[in-house]
Amino acid sequence: MLNKATQLEQAERERVFVTYVEDKPGVLNRVASLFRRRNFNIESLTVGHTEEEGVSRMTIVTNVSESVARRIEANLYKLVNVLRVEELTDKPKVFRDMALIKVQAQKEARVEVLQICDVFRARVVDVAPEALIVEITGENGKIEGLLELLRPYGVLETVRTGHVAMRRGYGIGSRPT
Amino acid sequence: MRITGARILWETLVQEGVDTVFGYPGGAILPVYDAMLDYPIHHVLVRHEQGAAHMADGYARASGRLGVAIATSGPGATNLVTGIATAMMDSSPILCITGQVSSDAIGSDAFQETDVTGVTLPITKHNYLVSSAEEIAPTIREACYIARSGRPGPVLVDISKDAQIEFAEYERDRSEVRLSGYRPDLRPSTDEFRSAAQMIEDAERPVILAGQGVLKSNAMQELAEFVNKTNIPVAMTLLGIGCFPASHPMNLGMMGMHGEAWVNQAIQESDLLLAFGMRFDDRVTGNLASYAPNAKKIHIDIDPSEINKVVRADVAIVGDLRETLREVNPLLQEQSHSTWLEHIDVLKQESGIRDVQNLPGNGRLLAAHVIHDLWQLTQGQAFVVTDVGQHQMWAAQYYRHDRPWTLATSGGLGTMGFALPAAIGARFARPDEEIWVIVGDGGFQMTQAELATCRQENIKLNIALINNSFLGMVRQWQEFFYDERYAATPMVNPDFVKLAEAHGLTGLRVERRNQVESAVQRARNTEDTVLIEFRVAQDEAVYPMVPSGADLQAMIRRPMNEVKARAPRSKSRVE
Ligand SMILES: Cc1cc2nc3c(=O)[nH]c(=O)nc-3n(C[C@H](O)[C@H](O)[C@H](O)COP(=O)(O)OP(=O)(O)OC[C@H]3O[C@@H](n4cnc5c(N)ncnc54)[C@H](O)[C@@H]3O)c2cc1C
Ligand SMILES: Cc1ncc(C[n+]2csc(CCOP(=O)(O)OP(=O)(O)O)c2C)c(N)n1
């Protein structure tokens, strides 16, 4: 029998890591290769520049247990180009994904689609006679919710950026020193 | 001064203290070879680049210094791969320098172009692609620093041909290398020392598991102090051998798959395991679900990613072992553990009866006898380099090391073909020491071409070739687990004595135990490399053996009927 603490430790759940890396060729490859080689799965990985020159920021979302999370952190730190890792899973944070959804919207359907978008605070960013492109930003549940409602009208294409995360408040705890 | 990239490379390497390199030339690295002639560098021409990587590795293991291997692009670089992976698994500090096609041709499938940084990404501690001369000096300095510091490991620097040829400004840089994303020396917190000391005080059946980290951190003295104070017995991993004197009364011997029976039994019965610089390899633990079920674990390791990787630690201390023991030792109480030690003694006696040393040879030459005799004849003072297989395990069991850094063996990757080139590398690190290569007939043939390197470099090695005309370790698995169906393990071998002679070296053959001594002494008294072929029994097995993935206490032991009379064995027995 596993005791309670062990059970909690082994339970898999969504975890969010913010990783600052040196902006050098092959860094993305090194991080991705680490996850592949150690058999840690990646749900989502986004990367972009930061306010600091030469430093990029990755948001990595993965579905793992507490002990695997600690190993991921330790292994990320072993990469020479990784400057700092912060796990935001249980921290107050803004956590966003963005999607573009191309949906069929002819005649009377168009009005309904626009109304749905309005409720979700999604923006229409392209209008064509037969279809609209809708832009939505939010957490996973919100985007899935909109997609669910738009599907009956005919979703032609979707694209998602993957998650980005930032800690709430004044603290910039994850900034490399 | 303005000099070529190739010269900058040598300037920097010389400044880093490099005086010996192992390599093989080719088009994409030629500017580097040409410039080498003007520097105080001894270059060892290998016969296959795998040999260069193993030599650099052997050099590093024998000296604790950085070993350097050089190869050309494409096939030269890919031939290094096995040696790099070997060094990675056993944390050996080597620097590999490879030539790359010119930077404007990269990505075009140019002649002999291979994405070497891509290929070696998962088997190096770090790697670099350099495509301008001015990057060479800072990159090499970083590479050397990364390879040597923290948990050491291989670093590869791939240099495009145009970067070797073009000129750049070079000034000696004496500053320390600083890398913002790399922290090799983490400091543990004092709370952890106290909880560790308390746990040690409370334990009744503690065992120290001493690994290669003891040797890497040079913590032999601190370990000895720890043991003298606490009277806790020491079990070693294969790579830890030598970190604690074999003749010390507190030494238990090797743990794991082919460890001594009493060591594994003690571990299984233990209530506290002290893991000092070892990483709980699956050859050490067997089935994890039943591993040391009643033991708390204290894990001290410099690499945070090793903590809780395999075995959950109750107290984890991340840091250099030597530094850590220096903090912990003063907190320890004197202990005696007499009941526990007496119990282990009882376990030992039962096992001793099955020891091959107590078996009559019955006229057959046994590899374990050969290695035992070799140990006695060399007074246990030789630097031993083994290959991989049964002979490796017998060497671990019967060549007893009292001094640190006297065994080099491929543990984590288990690379056949390692021994001869690694010993050549060791020779350059320890010019005056007696070196013995212990190698099987299978592994020897993987890198035997390096005999020519011995000749060309005029170096002295002693090679004990344990010839059982089988891929012995695999044959043993087939005997135990595959119904004695010997698929692809019998070997038809060349005449090894003639092979040695064809290289201008001395070859000897031994078929009976009473010839062992004179052959060994002759080898020791010959100036050149001597190869002794020991024609040993073909059907011997290494005992004890924990089948892969089985419980640590489920050892296959030498059948008792063999102990009484050495009759031809029927089936082995699982206890
Ligand atoms: C045929 C075969 C059979 C084998 N059978 C056995 C067997 O029966 N028993 C056995 O033990 N092995 C056996 N092995 C070897 C096994 O596969 C492993 O290589 C070995 O157990 C690893 O030992 P280790 O953990 O001490 O060394 P390593 O793998 O080198 O690990 C060393 C650890 O020490 C840490 N470290 C490094 N430097 C420091 C420092 N300065 N301070 C603190 N920590 C540090 C590292 O981070 C690492 O975690 C066998 C291999 C082969 C090929
Ligand atoms: C490069 C490589 N290939 C295959 C193996 C698998 N393997 C492990 S031990 C062994 C047999 C070794 O035979 P030999 O060198 O004759 O030594 P012995 O076991 O007989 O002492 C083999 C094939 C390996 N370890 N390395």
Image (spheres, coloured by chain):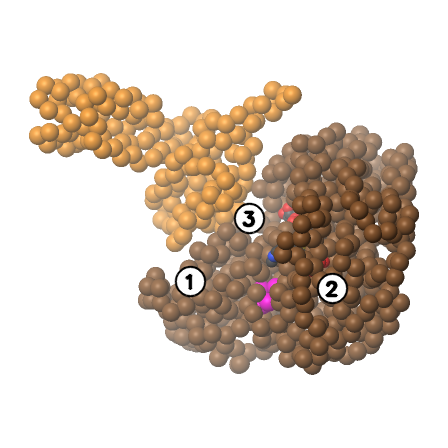
Chain colours: A orange, B brown
Q: Which mark is residue B183?
A: 3
- Disc 2 to disc 1, C-alpha distance: 38 Å
The residue depicted at 66 percent of the width and 57 percent of the height is B489
Q: Amino acid at mark 1?
A: Thr
Dot placed on the residue nearer the N-terminal end, 1 or 3:
1
Residue at the image point whose x is 13% and y is 25% from the top: A105
Who is closer to the viewer here, B86 or B416?
B416
Labels 3 and 2 positioned on one and the same chain: yes
Q: Position of residue B209 (x, y in %)?
A: 74, 43
Q: Quadrant of residue B52?
A: bottom right
Q: Which of pointers 2 and 1 lies earlier in the amino acid sequence? A: 1
Which circle marks residue B114 in the picture?
A: 1
Where is residue B83, by image quadrant? bottom right
Give the x, y percent position of residue A87.
Answer: 47, 33
Q: Is mark 2 within 8 Å of ligand 2?
A: yes
Name the kind of residue labelled 3 in the image: Arg
Q: Is residue A70 above or below residue B388?
A: above
Write down the residue under mark 2.
Answer: B467
Mark 1 crowd level (few <14, some 14–19, many ≥20, 10 Å Cα)? many
Assess whether mark 1 and mark 2 are in contact (beta carbons under 8 angstroms): no
Queried whether the magenta region covers residue B172, the answer comes back as: no
Chain of residue at mark 3: B
* Residue B200 image offset from top left, x and y in percent: 78, 34
Residue type for callout 2: Asn
Q: What's the CA distance linking mark 3 and mark 2? A: 47 Å
